[in-house]
Amino acid sequence: MIDTGVRPDTAVYRSLIQGFCTHGDLVKAKEYVTEMMNKGMLPPDIMFFSSIMQNLCTEGRVIEARDILDLMVHIGMRPDVPIFNLLIGGYCLVCKMEDATKVFDDMVSYGLEPCNITDGMLINGYCKNRRIDDGLILFKEMLHKGLKPTTFNYNVILDGLFLAGRTVAAKEKFNEMVESGVSMCISTYSIVLGGLCRNSCSSEAITLFQKLSTMNVKFDIRIVNIMIGAFYRVRRNQEAKDLFAAIPSNGLAANVVTYSIMIINLIKEGSVEEADNLFLSMEKSGCTADSCMLNHIIRRLLEKGEMVKAGNYISKVDANSYSLEAKTVSLLISLFSRKGKYREHITLLPTKYQFREEAATVELFDTW
């Protein structure tokens, strides 16, 4: 280009710098930035480098993103809070919390004041990496600094506490959130209701759900799925069915998770024909069963002794080019081996799965 007498402009330099930064050659990137400045051109601004860093962090290339921060400092640019937030979020994403904390300290040493987003990222990182106590300490420090926790901050802490099985502390934090006047979103309700159900507090989840319903809170299908499961868990089966039936009138559409919960529980209660009909209804609605759902149905039917129907669903696995999961294979071997409970019924399975006794394990695993 230069040999032909064409002088590179700012756009050309920016493209070159971006390319070298993205591919990790910061030496060349520095050379071109210096060349731009020597020619009296304005170097790329902070938003330019921020965009590159964000892409690198999203890909997990945080070390390279950190190198770009060093490049910015080298050319006399002063990083701002969002730049440091990118790095902190990047290190949290790759589970390097010590590095994230170091960037936080560097940020403070630059004379920058961390914001809610900064603290929120670190708290989220701690909670996702099972360091809930560190997250709680930082949350308290936010309060001491006079920062008001956001909905996101509370959601992260609530999710972390429920994941750690600390249900009492989670409920206290939820009550604190209510009393503080911080607005709640669908994600908040999903975290709390799901957390209660996962920690054997389905009845409490139902009570909260019913209270929220009287307040005209609009739920999404994730929450409806959680609550259908909760009703079944405490054997309030009819209420689960009523909630499922009300999905269209609430402006929602059942998804594969919804149908899976319903069908599995119908089989569990012995309503196998009803489960079959619901599966057909699901297919007609345009919702396609995934591998996880089919495997779960097969295991439930096998456990119920419904060999013919289990065989039908095994055929659906083949028709969709799915595979049987290890748990399903193990159950088949257990039930249909020489000493298995249903050995004499093995001919009810598709021919492909009628394995020989002596080579059961080898044949089954080789088939899939």
Image: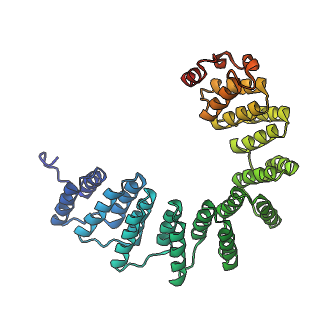
Residue furthest right as drawn: 238
**Quarter holding the C terminus?**
top right
| Residue at (52% x, 75% y) in the render | 137
- Return the x and y of residue 191 as percentages of the image width and height: 66, 61
- In the displayed structure, 303 sits above or below 229; it is above
Residue 330 showing in the rendered view: yes
- The quadrant in which residue 51 appears is bottom left
x, y percent for residue 318? 63, 24
Q: Nearer the viewer, residue 260 or 34?
A: 260
Residue 88 in which image quadrant? bottom left
Compare residues 22 and 162 and report the one nearer the observer: 162
Give the color scheme: rainbow, by chain, secondary structure or one colour. Answer: rainbow
Residue 68 vertical placement versus 104 (above, below): above
Q: Residue at x 67, y 77 (%)?
A: 181
Can you tell which quarter of the image residue 272 is in?
A: top right
Is residue 353 shown above or below 38?
Answer: above
| Residue 138 % position (x, y) | 50, 74
